[in-house]
């Protein structure tokens, strides 16, 4: 079992990475303030993984409430969140009842936010079941729901007490979802880990085949990288912004096409390509580096060309994004392969990038 | 100007108490991370106090967004909260935009919660305009909205950067609302401040006449008391529960009659009488003490007899309340006049109290 330790917000916790964790409830039991949990999951994940977890907990005397939500980013809304509150209140769940998120990033973000605000805060455990959730959304304590005017606009910083990344759950993940997770994996290489980027270049086939050892090491490396970046900057004032590599463009793509058309990771992949193209325009990246990024993303099954929404629409969508400070938009750009920085793009470069980098 | 200093959640701030504070924007300006605020208020308070505040800020170059909500506890809901998010997003308010709550406890609780979760947290200033908000809801960092299945069920602990208690605003407060605030004022005497209780007995007429000096001293005393109790126990694990004197009964009254029938403070007043009656049944308070409590509440214009909802209904409503831990309900009871404690009531005593203490 691989372990990554985090200590954020004065609330230390561990990410455990292995096969078979779902039913190892000995890992969970010592953390429960009362023998009572509410498992939040969705209609896709429940038939696959709810029963094993529920039975394992029940066998140890834990009272389990299951809350099964509809599946999809379009349901990452207040209305769906309210289904969690309805379930918790109808079952009279108390301040010591622990919420367990069993699912991908959507379930994790919503359950985490529900835990942050239900009765002003209840304990929370993450069991991420997508690659994206295991390497990204379950690490760092960001929780949120969407608002019609913007993604993740309403949320909280709230840390789980434990994260169980069970590699077994990835076996059932559709290929497209796995690839989407790979975008975030590759992102860590591009942010500040050239060694990892090159390791990925060498191991991409084993990775895509979901080889156990390869997966476990990659997930651990991603979590360590994210933990390191987040630890110095929990409230996203500075360096944490590096994690948004590809995301300012990516969010514009997601929201411009309508949530759900492209997966988050797909939009981030195309967004990272735009960031690379912009970095080249600024004189940093060379054509060979761009080519390596494009090749790795492509082998991971990801899009490398952003959709043609039109320059004006992109600008409008990005101005709406929350990484806006006094009117200027920050971009994460690349100084060289495996070294990113927080910068700005002048209007001309941004326009040229969008013209060149889109379909 | 009277000042109460708080240092909660590693976020020190001050409560300032005086006349004329609303337009003294020099107090606010140094705290703004950018010259931009969103004032959240309601349809009753806006015509009275929005313009002076807005003009004073605008005159100093601050960009002001006003968000005017419908008035009432029934609007302390997600739907209304969403009007705040709609307003903030439509105006593209950023992470550094400061939210100012201008109104009573409903506006304060909702605006505080909005500030806690808008983009995962933005700065927040309280300008409480009811007595209740000045002595209670603006102190301690609790924010919340109601859920159909329970009051204040969804919320956050979130501290403001400043609280301005402008006594001028109390001049327009309806008598019934002023009395409701007096319930919380008297509560502080009953919790652990016999000196204050006796001071109130001596000064109740001046207080009800809203005499400036009397008001200012009483508000300062209440804020000090609440700050002291909260400081040792920010997340409401232990002693902070004393602040709920009268509230377990009170919430049952409010929710049993339907929110809005009785004011919060009125329900708390009747709830404190029930707590006193229960304490007598346990052999603590004597009849003379009960009589003094009843007399003071009555002179403050408050109800001292709880509505006859029926014992069963009370029990059901209280079981729903969130101060429930593993099935037992905690009550704040009185050891003697001016000294409360966290205790439990056996079923027989509780039943007898409800039979004796209700209309
Ligand atoms: N909090 C953060 O720091 C953070 C970081 C990145 C992304 N996110 C959020 O994460 C979300 C995206 O997460 P995601 O990519 O996991 O999407 P997702 O949660 O929608 O999961 C993708 C799909 O896979 C299904 N699924 C989940 N686990 C499965 C399994 N084991 N087998 C088969 N199907 C499975 C889901 O039901 C869903 O249909 C977005 O809402 C994004 O905003 C949050
Ligand atoms: N956060 C906390 O710690 C805490 C503590 C106690 C109560 N509360 C909450 O506070 C709320 C009750 O607060 P409240 O009693 O201030 O109620 P409120 O906010 O509804 O105000 C009472 C009425 O007075 C009006 N009003 C406000 N200021 C006025 C003024 N200066 N002149 C004329 N009218 C004015 C309001 O518009 C409203 O109609 C409840 O929702 C309760 O849950 C919170
Ligand atoms: Zn992402
Ligand atoms: Zn109260």
Image: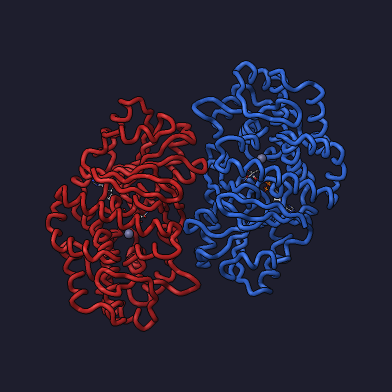
Chain colours: A red, B blue
Q: Quadrant of the N terminus of chain B?
A: bottom right
Q: Image quadrant of residue B162?
A: bottom right
Q: Reply above or below: B195 against B80.
A: above
In the drawing, does residue A120 fall left or right of residue A87?
right
Q: Position of residue A89 (x, y in %)?
A: 48, 35
Residue displayed at 14% across by 58% down: A203
Q: Image quadrant of residue B208?
A: top right
Relative depth, front residue between A294 and A223: A223
The image shows a total of numbered marks equal to: 0
Q: Reply above or below: B329 against B27.
A: above
Relative depth, front residue between B79 and A20: A20
In the drawing, does residue B86 fall left or right of residue B206?
left
The answer to whether any part of residue A42 appears in the image is no
Q: Position of residue B181 (x, y in %)?
A: 73, 43
Q: Position of residue A49 (x, y in %)?
A: 26, 38
Q: Quadrant of the C terminus of chain B?
A: top right
Relative depth, front residue between A29 and B279: A29
Image quarter for ligand 4? top right
The answer to whether any part of residue B232 appears in the image is yes
């Amino acid at each position: 079992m691989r372990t990554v330790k985090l200590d954020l917000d004065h609330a230390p916790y561990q990410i455990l990475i292995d096969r078979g964790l779902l039913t190892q409830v000995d890992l969970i039991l010592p953390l429960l303030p009362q023998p009572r949990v509410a498992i939040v999951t969705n209609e896709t994940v429940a038939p696959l993984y709810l029963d094993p977890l529920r039975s394992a907990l029940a066998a140890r005397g834990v009272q389990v409430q299951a809350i099964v939500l509809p599946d999809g980013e379009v349901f990452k809304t207040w209305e769906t969140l309210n289904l969690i509150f309805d379930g918790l209140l109808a079952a009279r769940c108390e301040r010591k009842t622990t919420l367990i998120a069993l699912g991908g990033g959507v379930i994790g973000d919503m359950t985490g936010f529900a835990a942050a605000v239900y009765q002003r805060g209840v304990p929370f455990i993450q069991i991420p079941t997508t690659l994206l959730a295991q390497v990204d959304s379950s690490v760092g304590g960001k929780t949120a729901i969407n608002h019609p005017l913007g993604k993740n606009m309403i949320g909280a910083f709230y840390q789980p007490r434990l994260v169980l990344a069970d590699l077994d759950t990835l076996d059932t993940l559709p290929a497209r979802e796995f690839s989407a997770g790979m975008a975030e994996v590759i992102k860590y290489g591009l942010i500040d880990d050239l060694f990892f980027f090159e390791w990925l270049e060498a191991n991409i086939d084993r990775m895509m085949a979901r080889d156990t050892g390869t997966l476990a090491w990659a997930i651990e490396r991603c979590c360590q990288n994210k933990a390191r970046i987040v630890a110095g900057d929990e409230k996203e004032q500075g360096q944490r912004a590096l994690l948004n590599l590809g995301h300012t463009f990516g969010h514009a793509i997601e929201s411009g096409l309508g949530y759900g058309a492209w997966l988050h990771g797909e939009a981030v992949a195309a967004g990272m390509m735009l960031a690379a193209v912009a970095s080249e325009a600024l004189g940093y990246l060379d054509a060979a580096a761009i080519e390596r990024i494009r090749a790795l993303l492509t082998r991971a099954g990801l899009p490398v060309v952003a959709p043609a929404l039109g320059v004006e629409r992109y600008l409008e969508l990005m101005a709406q994004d929350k990484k806006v400070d006094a009117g200027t938009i920050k971009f994460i750009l690349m100084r060289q392969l495996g070294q990113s920085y927080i910068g700005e793009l002048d209007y001309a470069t941004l326009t040229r990038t969008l013209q060149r980098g889109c379909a």
